[in-house]
């Protein structure tokens, strides 16, 4: 059984920002069929900042802890800052992840980045319609 840091266990046992945002500005969904982890991130954007970040994750303890940490890291950040959150930052913030669970930290930032890209795509479409 993998050994997890206290921080991983804390975020697994008490995940932050779990849930869905009604009518979100962006949604990002990723999954890893190999391990069965599925993550969906929902974002609310206000004035270029991530006002709210929520997630739903189906997966192992590491996947849940990663989702929780990514949501914490992203909240209140600008879109540009949030796009810089990567797997290494997430794993570091969690006090490390076992090698066989590191792929989970890739999923967290990917789901967040997809949600931001979804938001930017919708924003571009709206701006295009106003012309």
Image (tube, rainbow, N blue to C red):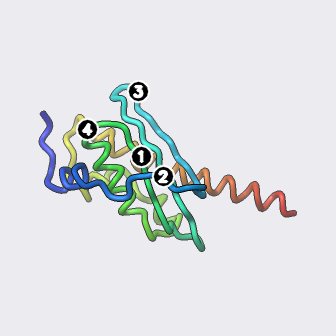
Residue that appears at 69% across and 59% down = 123
State the separation of the CA atoms marked 1 and 2. Answer: 7 Å
- Asked whether disc 1 touches disc 2, contact meaning CB atoms under 8 Å apart, the reply is yes
Mark 1 → mark 3, Cα distance in angstroms: 17 Å
Between marks 2 and 3, how big is the CA–CA gap? 23 Å
Which residue is disc 1 drawn over? 56
Q: Earlier in the sequence, mark 1 or mark 2?
A: 2
Mark 1 vs 4, N-terminal side: 1
- Relative height, residue 89 to residue 34 (above, below): below
Residue 92 location, x and y as percent? 25, 56
Nearest the eye: 96 or 6: 6
**Which mark, residue 20?**
2
Residue 101: assigned label: 4
Q: Nearer the viewer, mark 1 or mark 3?
A: 1
Which mark is nearer the camera, 1 or 4?
A: 1
Q: Residues within 10 Å of mark 2 (few under 14, many from 20)?
A: some
Numbered badge on residue 33:
3
């Amino acid at each position: 059984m993998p050994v997890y840091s206290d921080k991983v266990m804390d975020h697994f046992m008490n995940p932050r920002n779990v849930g869905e945002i009604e009518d979100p500005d962006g949604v990002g969904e990723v999954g890893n069929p190999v391990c069965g982890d599925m993550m969906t991130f929902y974002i609310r954007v206000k004035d270029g900042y991530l006002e709210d970040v929520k997630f739903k994750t189906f997966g192992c303890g590491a996947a849940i802890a990663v989702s929780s940490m990514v949501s914490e890291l992203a909240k209140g950040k600008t879109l540009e800052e949030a796009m810089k959150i990567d797997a290494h930052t997430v794993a570091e913030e969690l006090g490390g992840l076992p090698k066989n669970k590191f792929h989970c930290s890739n999923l967290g930032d990917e789901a967040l980045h997809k949600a931001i890209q979804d938001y930017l795509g919708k924003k571009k479409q709206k701006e295009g319609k106003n012309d």
